[in-house]
Image (tube, rainbow, N blue to C red):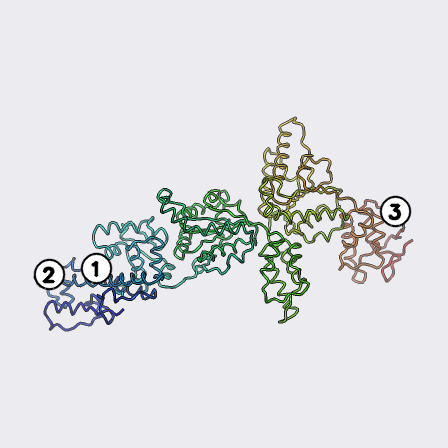
């Protein structure tokens, strides 16, 4: 809107009746009091003729013009108050000294101050009138007005933000104040009309004042009174007021503000769980209004926010659900994902929560255990964070796969904790379908149900598997791409291997093959397949079918593998891990035992907790040393040993994962453990056919073999277990690898010598054939060996 030009120099000459004074240049720094840009129209407009604001810049232009006028009025009033009308005469070039103020001088001073005051009030009325029209004509409001409404800022606080913003971006205000810096005292004098207002205004600059507490402004402290403190507006706050959206990542690494596009319909979760989450957040605004209306805000001033905890393994939909919640509520997401804030923790926490309020965003802490971790783990920042959560009145979502690492004080501030479990085959099939667009050409052999049953992958890994399949299909077919079952299978296998290697922890074993790689009796293979099927079905049993509601114990899978050394017990545990997509944590039972009272119990607690945190299969090797039978009490040592056994029984019943015990001495296992075992499987010494299959399986296809190697004869002649056969092959290969290149291959002689060493029998024993080994011939080379590498058998 156009404004008239107020020329104070002309006004003074008119009031003095001295038109003979020459006109002064309006921008002379010595003579100018109020310099305004030429604008047409009247300031004092009728309210009916005022138009509503349409942009933030239009709103700010009016506000800055009013504030610049108020600053000029304050400067004139301050100078007149100090020197009387002498200041005005100096502006007119009357530099001569005058002892007294004349009646004309007093009249001029009153008129100038009156005119400046009227003009400032007219500009303020104009701003208020246009703002009222804006409120009455639609839902849009300038950004600063939205902040003021959301954070309950009063008129003084709002004007402070406008003045500090104008000091940076408005030439009018910069010229009026001769710079961009303000002190607390300056702001109080400019914006307050009397002593009472200035005294009341001081509280807005205290640490618990809204502007300071939420980081909208900062004070540079000095050793003098508060009025001498410099005041600055936060950079991001200023950018927001003037209509710019500063990327949070420019100010804080690991943070991002965005509008989510994922709706709740795209999230694959049990319908009951999804409904609980969405119903909880949909009633949040009603909940806040009820708190205020019923007086709870006065009775319980803190804890107005709603804090939701999403916990579960990686890739189970926690982040996707947080985005879906924001999408349903039509809010932005302020994502925070960083390990630590260091020395600036106080300022950064304050800044993050303020930005969430300013943008009316959901504050989402992903992988929150890094900054919400327990004080017992050395987290010194948790106190600051809890304070900000207590002050916050919005929605906060935390996501973690390590809920037990969170500080205890954090748990009592959580409104709703939702567990995100590994999807069962039904949900995995839905996730596979959801990640394959309709435009994709799928081969006739694609069977998503089979993929869902075979590969126990969460949603994040299924997404990656689909992209891997697309990449493979594009490399093969070019633009006319068709995705087949083999592409999807290969993508799933790649993701399964990646998942197994993702988590690193002490004693980790990454399985490399499944049940197909095992050479075992058929009935034992079927029993191991049942272990896998039970674990894959557990998400269905403990979820939709409600078995978890019956009892908190017995929800895991415990199995005992017993048999002679080398019969494949540990390898079978690895195969189970591969099939269900989890790494192994192998514990030598003897290492948990301690001669110090109580240490064994601590070790046991730690092992089970780590397995739970890492979602790993816990394997106790040589379990008879730890799970042995309890004894009659003869000493304190016996008492504590029995306590350890009781603790193991407790954890076996309560552990939610897979626990496998392996032993060669099953008779020494305490009988109470057998009741906790869902599977007790015996691993026998392999028969001849299995031994031959083991020889074939354990000899790598890339290893060069001589033509005389007879695996069937080896299987008949040596009653070895798989572990023995593996040792024999490795020793024989080591001998062959050091020979000249033309004879570098594994021969029957190499295998026979290594087998005899493994058996411990250094003398030749007739097993249907007898190799002749002559003295002076290099080890592994037969004197009768021909060019083809065959050994002549007697």
Instruction: Give the percent coordinates (x, y) of residue 115.
Output: 17, 63
Residue 765, numbered label: 3
Dot 2: element: helix
Residue identified by numbered label 1: 74
**Contact (Cβ within 8 Å) of mark 3 with mark 1:** no
Question: Which residue shows up at 73% across the image and 53% down it?
Answer: 517
Mark-to-mark CA distance, 3 and 1? 115 Å
Would you say 619 lies left or right of 777 here? left
Mark-to-mark CA distance, 3 and 2? 133 Å
Would you say 734 lies left or right of 642 here? right
Mark-to-mark CA distance, 2 and 1? 18 Å
- Judged by depth in the image, the label closer to the viewer, 3 or 1, is 1
Mark 2 Cα shell of 10 Å, populated few (<14), some (14-19), many (≥20): few
Pick the front one: 54 or 203:
54
Q: In which quarter of the image is the N terminus?
A: bottom left
Instruction: Give the percent coordinates (x, y) of residue 734.
Output: 76, 54
Q: Residue furthest right?
A: 794
**Contact (Cβ within 8 Å) of mark 2 with mark 1:** no
Residue identified by numbered label 2: 106
Instruction: Give the percent coordinates (x, y) of residue 60.
Output: 31, 64
**Contact (Cβ within 8 Å) of mark 3 with mark 2:** no
Mark 1 Cα shell of 10 Å, populated few (<14), some (14-19), many (≥20): many
Question: Which residue shows up at 45% across the image and 56% down it?
Answer: 329
Q: Earlier in the sequence, mark 3 or mark 1?
A: 1
Residue 356, numbered label: none
Question: Which residue shows up at 23% across the image and 66% down it?
Answer: 45
Q: Is residue 751 visible?
A: yes
Mark 3 Cα shell of 10 Å, populated few (<14), some (14-19), many (≥20): few
- Label tally: 3
């Amino acid at each position: 809107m156009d404004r008239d030009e107020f020329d104070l120099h002309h006004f003074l000459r008119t009031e003095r009746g001295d038109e003979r004074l020459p006109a002064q240049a309006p921008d002379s720094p010595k003579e100018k009091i109020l310099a305004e840009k030429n604008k047409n129209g009247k300031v004092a407009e009728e309210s009916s003729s005022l138009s509503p604001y349409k942009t933030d810049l239009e709103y700010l232009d009016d506000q800055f013009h009013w504030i610049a006028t108020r600053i000029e009025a304050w400067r004139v009033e301050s100078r007149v108050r100090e020197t009387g009308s002498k200041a005005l005469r100096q502006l007119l070039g009357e530099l001569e000294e005058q002892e007294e103020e004349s009646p004309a001088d007093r009249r001029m001073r009153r008129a100038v101050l009156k005119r400046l005051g009227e003009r400032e009030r007219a500009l303020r009325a104009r701003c208020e009138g246009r703002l009222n029209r804006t409120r009455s004509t639609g839902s849009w409001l300038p950004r600063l007005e939205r902040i003021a409404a959301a954070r309950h800022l009063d008129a003084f606080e709002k004007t402070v933000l406008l003045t500090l913003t104008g000091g940076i971006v408005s030439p009018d205000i910069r010229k009026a104040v001769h710079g961009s810096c303000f002190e607390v005292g300056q702001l109080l004098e400019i914006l307050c009309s009397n002593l009472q207002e200035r005294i009341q205004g001081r509280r807005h600059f205290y640490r618990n004042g809204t502007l300071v507490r939420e980081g909208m402004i900062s004070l540079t402290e000095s050793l003098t009174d508060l009025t001498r403190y410099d005041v600055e507006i936060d950079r991001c706050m200023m950018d927001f007021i003037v209509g710019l959206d500063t990327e949070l990542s420019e100010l804080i690494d690991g943070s991002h503000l965005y509008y989510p596009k994922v709706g709740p319909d795209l999230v694959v979760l049990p319908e009951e769980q999804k409904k609980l989450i969405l119903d909880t957040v949909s009633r949040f605004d009603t909940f806040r209004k009820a708190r205020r209306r019923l007086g709870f805000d006065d009775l319980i001033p803190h804890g107005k926010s709603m804090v939701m905890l999403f916990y579960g393994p990686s890739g189970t939909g926690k982040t996707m659900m947080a985005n879906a919640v924001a999408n349903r509520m039509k809010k932005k997401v302020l994502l925070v994902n960083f390990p630590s804030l260091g020395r600036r923790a106080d300022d950064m926490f304050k800044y993050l929560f303020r930005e969430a309020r300013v943008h009316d965003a959901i504050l989402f802490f992903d992988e929150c255990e890094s900054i919400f971790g327990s004080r017992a783990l050395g987290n010194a920042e948790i106190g600051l964070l809890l304070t900000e959560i207590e002050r916050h009145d919005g929605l906060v979502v935390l996501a973690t796969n390590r809920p037990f690492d969170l500080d205890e004080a954090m748990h009592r501030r959580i409104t709703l904790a939702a567990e995100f479990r590994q999807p069962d085959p039904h949900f995995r099939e839905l996730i596979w379908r959801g990640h394959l667009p309709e435009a994709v050409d799928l081969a006739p052999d694609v069977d998503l149900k089979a993929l869902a049953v075979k590969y126990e992958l969460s949603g994040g890994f299924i997404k990656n598997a689909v992209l891997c399949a697309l990449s493979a299909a594009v490399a093969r077919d070019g633009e006319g791409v068709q995705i087949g079952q083999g592409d999807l299978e290969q993508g799933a296998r790649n993701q399964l291997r990646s998942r197994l290697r993702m988590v690193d922890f002490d004693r980790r074993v990454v399985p490399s093959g499944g049940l197909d790689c095992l050479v075992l009796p058929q009935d034992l293979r079927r029993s191991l397949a049942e272990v896998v099927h039970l674990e894959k079905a557990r998400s269905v049993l403990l979820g939709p079918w409600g078995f978890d509601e019956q009892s908190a114990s017995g929800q895991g899978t415990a199995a005992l593998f017993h048999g002679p050394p080398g019969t494949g017990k540990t390898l079978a545990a690895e195969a189970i891990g591969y099939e269900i997509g989890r790494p192994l944590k192998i514990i030598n039972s003897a290492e948990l035992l301690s001669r110090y009272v109580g240490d064994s119990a601590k070790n046991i607690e730690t092992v089970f907790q780590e397995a739970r945190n890492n979602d790993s299969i816990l394997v106790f090797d040589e379990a008879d040393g730890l799970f042995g039978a309890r004894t009659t009490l003869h000493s304190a040592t016996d008492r504590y040993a029995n306590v350890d056994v009781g603790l193991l029984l407790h954890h076996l019943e309560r552990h939610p994962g897979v626990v496998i015990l392996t032993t060669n001495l099953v008779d020494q296992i305490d009988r109470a453990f057998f009741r906790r075992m869902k599977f007790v499987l015996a691993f026998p010494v392999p028969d001849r056919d299995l031994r031959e299959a083991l020889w074939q399986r354990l000899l790598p296809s890339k290893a060069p073999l001589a033509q005389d190697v007879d695996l069937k004869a080896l299987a008949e002649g040596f009653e070895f277990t798989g572990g023995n056969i593996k040792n024999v092959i490795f020793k024989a290969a080591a001998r062959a690898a050091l020979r000249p290149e033309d004879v570098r291959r594994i021969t029957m002689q190499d295998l026979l010598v290594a087998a005899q060493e493994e058996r411990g029998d250094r003398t030749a024993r007739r097993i249907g054939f007898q190799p002749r080994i002559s003295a002076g011939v290099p080890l592994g080379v037969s004197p009768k060996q021909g060019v083809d590498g065959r050994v002549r058998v007697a």
